[in-house]
Amino acid sequence: MSTLTFPENNSRRKKLSQKIAFAFCFALSLCIVLVLACILLFIIVKGIRVINWDFISQPPADGMTGGGILPAIIGTLYLMLGSAIVSFPIGIMSGIYMNEYATNGKLVRFIRMMTNNLAGIPSIVFGLFGMAIFVNYLDFGDSIIAGSLTLGLLSLPVIIRTTEEALKDIPDSMREGSRALGATQLQTIWNVILPMAVPRIITGLILSMGRVSGETAPILFTCAAYFLPQLPGSIFDQCMALPYHLYVLATSGTDLEKQQPIAYGTALVLIIIVLFINLAANAIRKYFANKVKTN
Amino acid sequence: MEIIKAQNVNFYYGSFHALKNISMDIEEKSVVAFIGPSGCGKSTFLRLFNRMNDLIPKTRLEGQILINGQNIYGKNVQVDQLRKEVGMVFQRPNPFPKSIYENVAYGLKVNGIKDPNVIEERVVESLKGAALWEEVKDKLKKSAYALSGGQQQRLCIARAMAVSPQILLMDEPASALDPISTSKIEELIRELKKQVTIVIVTHNMQQASRVSDRTAFFYMGEMVEYGRTKDIFTNPEKEATQNYITGRFG
């Protein structure tokens, strides 16, 4: 027994340094929560006053110093839907190709590098590209379809990346187990691999939708209307959008003072939409995760 | 009659020569065990019989493997069809994250069987055949992950047997299991050999001597010795085999 000694001083010092490190990490994490809480609180306090049924069911009125923001809400929803139609299939299928089919390592690395580069391009450049290609060259004009295509391109990298990562996490023993029973590669992906990856893929899709709903620059030259009292009638019409409307209310217009509360109300609506999508996504993800586990 | 005939098989992972000139005949409805130290090529050889090594890039095969007289690496062979005839059970139980029932039904469904009555009949039959029916008959809709490791492995055997293969390959099927589960698997092997030819890779020499009719000893990519299990374990011809089974190396 006498050979076993525990130097107390040393261990006390170790404990103290542990405590300091943990406290530091905790304080920093708390900071992030605080910043988020501040932003939310600020928007809510400033914006809640203008929010009522008329605000979300009426178009702007009186030179945008009154009325509601219905066309902007609808426009943003259209753009989200449109860009989802563009980017979900392409993104998911690219991710599947990269992780499941492609055997040429060099090609995959090249595609992955380009995808990452795409993610790094500033969104205003996407806007310029969309204007050159979709608005002018393909002659869609400023329209929902041009905006959707531009936003779709913008959200592709996130979708491809998360799909790829989700598939990569599925152990090869699942693929081998399925192939060993005589299933083709497509059957294996469709019946075993994708259902397991769906919860994480959905997360990626939702993240991309959150980004799409908040982007201003890509729709600036491709779609967004300064003011449209009526709702768009077809995908070749322009539309209003919440982030651009917010920008307009805050920087131009007839009376910036009067517009300010409406701007905060618009911001609040935008945040609520994104929050709602995130909650819905969580519910969907949990539903699929449970299904995978127990079915 | 031989169901599997390997002729002068050489196999390469890139430039690594993993299997060296192996020839072997395997009798129908017998149990053949592959033994040898880790990395000797026994699993690689096993995975050639259902072309599972095709999934690994940069591999190359020389020589022929005939199953029922047909070269399974021939041009017109449908690999998916081959794998239906040559089932496989892996080292770690790998049930799908589906219900117990769906796990067994999966192989039937991907092979185009749609009639739910036929599927149900085959599922029940396979679970009984894998000595699992009594334990799971009341929870077929429950997740396969709720089963113990040993039960999961028997589920994987039931899953493989559901598509009525002629040959069942087992890659160390009991190495991740406890002794009781292991003895259940061994019992099952003795039962299943009435229906199928079984090739089993094992690290456990007692297991090889208990379940197999013939044993092949692999070392450094070569098949050192292949013969009746009784002879291999009591009176091996080669010194390397003798050394391995008496535990002097490996």
Image: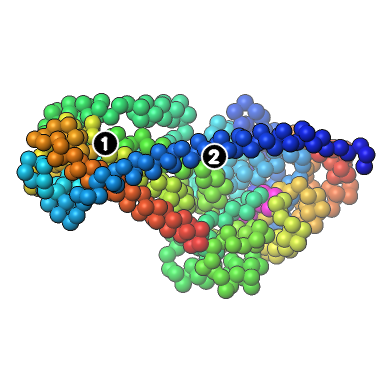
Would residue B205 be found to the left or right of residue A127 on screen? Answer: right
> Which mark lies nearer to you, 1 or 2?
2
Q: State the residue at coordinates (57%, 61%).
A: B144
Given the image, what chain letter belongs to the residue carrying mark 2? A
Name the chief secondary structure element in magenta.
strand
Res B143 quadrant in image: bottom right
Given the image, what chain letter belongs to the residue carrying mark 1? A
SS of the residue at dot 1? loop
What percent of the width, then of the height, locates residue A125? 25, 25
Distance from Cα at disc 1 to Cα at disc 2: 32 Å
Residue A183 belongs to the span the image colors magenta: no
What percent of the width, then of the height, locates residue B164? 56, 61
Would residue B186 be found to the left or right of residue A160 on screen? Answer: right
What percent of the width, then of the height, locates residue A97? 40, 38
Q: Can residue B135 be seen at all in this image of the molecule?
A: yes
**Magenta stretch, residue numbers:** B167-173
Q: How many marks?
A: 2
Badge 1 local density, few (<14 within 10 Å), some, or many (20+)?
Answer: some
Q: Quadrant of the N terminus of chain A?
A: top right
Question: What's the residue type where badge 1 is placed?
Answer: Glu
Pick the front one: B175 or B193: B175
A58 lies above or below A130: below
Label at residue A26: 2
Q: Which residue is under mark 1?
A: A215
Would residue A59 be found to the left or right of residue A170 on screen? Answer: left
SS of the residue at dot 2? helix
Label at residue B17: none
Q: State the residue at coordinates (23%, 34%).
A: A216
Pick the front one: A101 or B150: B150
Q: Can residue A238 be seen at all in this image of the molecule?
A: no
Question: What's the residue type where badge 2 is placed?
Answer: Phe
Q: State the residue at coordinates (39%, 48%).
A: A202
